[in-house]
Image: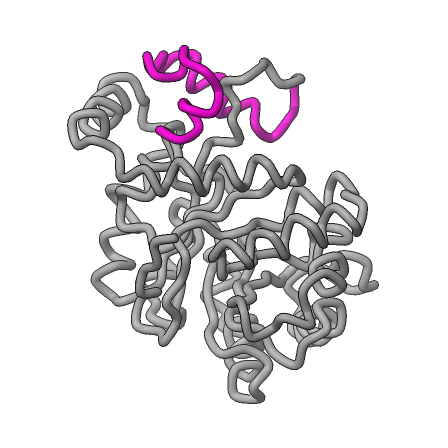
Amino acid sequence: MERRQFGKTDMNVSVLGFGGAEIGYTETPQGIVDQLLNAALDAGLNVIDTAECYRGSEVAIGNAVSHRRDDYYLFTKCGHASGLDMPDWDPEMLALSIDRSLERLKTDHVDLIQLHTCGEDVLRKGDVIDVIQRAKEAGKTRYIGYSGDGNDARYAVECGAFDALQTSVNIADQEAIETTLPVARRKGMGIIAKRPIANVAWREEPPAGAYRRIYWERLNRLKYAFLEGDIPSSVATALKFTLAHQVDVAIVGTEKPDRWKTNARSLSEGPLAPDIIAEIRSRWKEIAPPDWVGQG
């Protein structure tokens, strides 16, 4: 699998990474997580990304692959109390949460800790940044990052405190391509794309209130021709589009081992043709109104 230099860090990351949200929220059985992650590592994936708020995700990942800690880069996120009886973004809570994540993941350090959808107002106070900087100094993480979108992400990039940015980049969410990504790249930050296949929101209409419904509504207006094809080929096009835009690693969540294999196989077939990329970008610029901003 292709690997890319992750900003100014010493990490050389696989372009396809594993996102731990789905296995947490769907309570995927441990045996399936074991099978999925070990097969992915064997095939060349070397990035696993999760968060303290993804329910049982950190525990499942720790149980599955902590014995192979040298085989992958481990990213997690912090900021939400998620069971600790303290407010979100409280500095004391944040420090406790980081230690809890390490315990769950069965490791003494992660490669990247990210502040998770933290607002610009909180970032400007500096307390939360101080906490993760101290975690870095203590060896609990090698690098620090920010995960979020829009103006909050723009401030996080411009403030100069972070080594990496994780933000939404996909066929239904292209704001960052022209705003945060160029600035992050100039600053030498590693760039992680979340939701790189737009949650496959074109597959079926999600229920009202579902987090992927915004993408479904956007895609119904964008009406990309390639989405009328079969799901594997349309997913491949969507994923390759994301990876064509200053992204080092695209994080895809799944609980189905075959889906990971399909995505990896499609990437091995080569990048998306420039004319298809241009067509998707042109359609976005024609249809997308100003309020189609990045989704956290």
Q: Residue at x 32, y 60 (%)?
A: 4
Residue 246 x, y percent position in the rendering: 27, 50
Tally of numbered discs: 0
Position above or below: 109 against 217: below
Overall secondary structure of the magenta section: helix
Q: Is residue 151 magenta?
A: no
Colour mapping used in the image: one colour
Residue depicted at x 40% and y 16%: 227
Question: Residue 272 falls in which quadrant of the image?
Answer: top left
Where residue 74 appears, as percent x and y from the top left, is 56, 66
Q: Residue at x 59, y 81 (%)?
A: 140
Q: Nearer the viewer, residue 87 or 160?
A: 160
* x and y percentages locating residue 17 in the rendered image: 49, 52
Decide if residue 97 is in sight here.
no
From the viewer's side, name the closer residue of 175 and 70.
Answer: 70
Residue 60 appears in the picture as rendered:
yes
**x and y percentages locating residue 149 in the rendered image:** 43, 46
For the record, the magenta segment spans: 208-237
User: Can you say whether 158 is above or below 91 in the image?
Assistant: above
Q: On screen, 57 above or below 93?
A: above
